[in-house]
Amino acid sequence: MDLVTGITGLVGSHVALELLAEGRTVHGLVRQGSDRDIVRKVFNHYRRDGNALFDRIVWAEGDILDAIALREAMSGVERVFHCAAMVSFDPRDAKRMFATNINGTANVVNAALECGVRKLVHVSSTAATGRSDNGQPVNEDMPWKRGKHTSPYAVSKYESEMEVHRSVAEGLDAVMVNPSVVYGAGATGRGSLAVISRVSKGTSFYPTGSNGLVDARDVAAAMLIAADRGVTGERYILSTEPISYLTLFTTIAEANGQRPPTKAIPSWVLGLAWRAEAFRTALMGGRSLVTRYTAHSALQHYRYDTSKAQALGITFRDPLETIQSAVAFYKSLL
């Protein structure tokens, strides 16, 4: 019996699908009022028996900030796949994000220790890994450094990993995966679907940077492999080779019958854009379309060394296939 936290999220829904397809009994931790039907839609996007698999989920209502609810949800559970997290690059969300990602993870590992969980797999992020100073691909052993461009999200994921390391020191068998940008079927307006939604409406502009991405299906499969063969206390970077934002935006645009972008966004324009957005949202509220952290990231070129994950037998889909699948799901919701 397995527990998936954050089951209605991008990674959590895919992990649940992978587990159910293997015949496991899945308990899904869900907050009151969350849209459970998005999980059904994700299942049906990939499988003809999606409805049947969805109906096998055992729902456990609760929040990772509720220690009592967590202990109840973990009663009798063999493995925990901790996918619940808040992702935001808006500085105004920092306090709530720290509570969810750091305190929530502390609660999860504490409950796992108390309930005798055999294995915990924690979803971290490449935001919590170190950065290369010489252009070499980032690996799991590079030291994490906090700088002026380090986002609150990155801090929250790094501190979450520290909670997992603490639990390992206290006797929990736990491993971590560090995906780059995750693409797949999921709720609109969040994560990769938010990018797809914006680009699908047409744009002439693209950022000049590049980044790795990874299919949510591959993250899920990697987590199951890590649960079976991952080394206690270790982490595994999950990513494809870097893809430019020009290629990303072009693939999304063409899949929606739009003209691909042709104009690179200069760094000074992004600098003005995030400042203007900060001013606008301070006066009028709402969500920022670009922040100082996303503006900086859009100009960088990130590369990751995934040899450690591949040594476990983890593989990755072609990024263009991943993007096209995610776009097809987005279009199915329109």
Image (tube, helix red, strand yellow):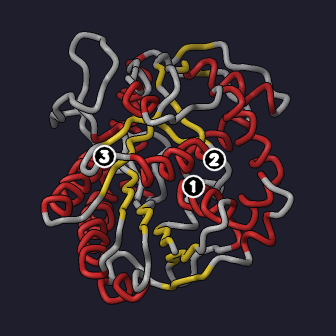
Q: Nearer the viewer, residue 262 or 109?
A: 109
Across and down, in percent, residue 104 comes to 30, 69
Find disc 1 in the rendering and name its residue. 10
Q: Residue at x 58, y 41 (%)?
A: 218
Residue at 61%, 68% (x, y): give it.
Answer: 24
Q: Considering only order in the chain, which callout, 3 or 1, is on the residue closer to the N terminus? A: 1
Q: Which residue is mark 3?
A: 231
The picture places residue 69, in percent across and down from the top left corner, at: 38, 87
- Which of discs 3 and 2 lies nearer the camera? The answer is 3
- For label 2, count other residues whose C-alpha is less than 10 Å away and answer few (under 14), some (14-19) or many (20+): many
Q: Is residue 100 left or right of residue 23?
A: left
Q: Nearer the viewer, residue 230 or 32?
A: 230
**Image quarter hosting the C terminus:** bottom right
Please name the residue that numbered disc 2 is placed on: 193
Amino acid type for the residue under numbered disc 1: Leu
- In this view, the residue in front, 82 or 20, is 20
- Name which quarter of the figure residue 202 lies in: top right
**Image vertical order of residue 125 relative to residue 76, above or below:** above
Mark 2 or mark 1: whose residue is earlier in sequence = 1
Q: Is residue 201 above or below residue 44?
A: above
